[in-house]
Image (spheres, helix red, strand yellow):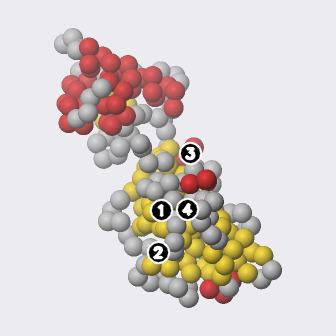
Amino acid sequence: MTLTDRQQAILDFIRSFSVKTKYPPTIREIGKSVGISSTSVVNYNLNVLEKQGLIARDKTISRGIKLVQETPDMLPVETVRIPVLGRIAAGEPMPVPGSDFAILGDEVIELTRELLPVDDKHIFALQVRGNSMVDAMIGDGDIVVMQQRQKADNGDLVAVWLKDREETTLKRFFLEKGKVRLQPANPTMQPIFADPKNVEIQGKVVLVIRRPN
């Protein structure tokens, strides 16, 4: 069976993307590359390629497409599934019910292991609400990948639980003269000053995933 121009374009994109990044594209990335807005249409064409033995698919993961005849540059990629545990305010502190972040259903993000600059143990993700960290290239709706921490160094970007306020916030941490300064990365906003005994560090940002425009 001869491939249509669209199916050939999809196959070519999967090949070039995989060689360049060392991992396969998602359905949405494929659709964007070939001008298809419907994921179901992309899925139909992928099924055709699979039936012809050109690709293999694992539909349980987002990057589960594999060329049957891989090039030497396309090596198997280790992926890490990271739970999105809730939302965190990058602005004024946001009240939450208790000190644990609310679970966002069964939502997870999947990353290639090589993207994580740290070990993948005790890793979780939070969705950002607010714009206090825009100068740190973190905007409303972005995802921050965190490593669980209870201590921080000056300048670390951390998720902080303010125990006396029962609120949580995302800021840069500074300990100065016996006081904690939680510094926003937005010149229009003021820092938060707190007694160290009222500050509980819950994690340090290790990776930022920008929301697609």
Q: Is residue 56 visible?
A: no
- Mark 3 or mark 1: which comes first in sequence? 3
User: Is the residue under label 4 in contact with that under label 2 (CB below 8 Å)?
Assistant: no
Q: Nearer the viewer, residue 139 or 69?
A: 139
Label 3 and label 4: CA atoms lie apart by 25 Å
Q: Give the labeled residue for mark 4.
A: 132
Instruction: Say whether residue 77 is visible.
Output: yes
Quarter where residue 48 is shown: top left
Q: Does residue 189 appear to the left or right of 56 in the view shown?
A: right
Q: CA distance from mark 1 to mark 4?
A: 6 Å
Residue type (three-letter) at the residue carrying disc 1? Gly
Q: Quadrant of the N terminus?
A: top left
Q: Mark 2 touching mark 1, by CB under 8 A? A: yes
**Label 2 Cα crowd, 10 Å radius (few <14 / some 14-19 / many 20+):** some
Q: Is residue 111 above or below residue 88?
A: above
Disc nearest the viewer among 2 and 4: 4
> What residue is at 33 percent from the left and 62 percent from the top?
106
Q: Position of residue 62 (x, y in %)?
A: 35, 43
Q: Residues within 10 Å of mark 1 (few under 14, many from 20)?
A: many
The correct choice, above or below, for 112 with respect to 150 in the image is: above
Instruction: Quadrant for the C terminus, please.
Output: top left
Relative to residue 187, is residue 178 depicted above or below?
Answer: below
Label number found at residue 94:
2
Amino acid type, label 3: Leu
Q: Residues within 10 Å of mark 4 (few under 14, many from 20)?
A: many
Upstream in sequence: badge 2 or badge 4: 2
Marking on residue 130: 1
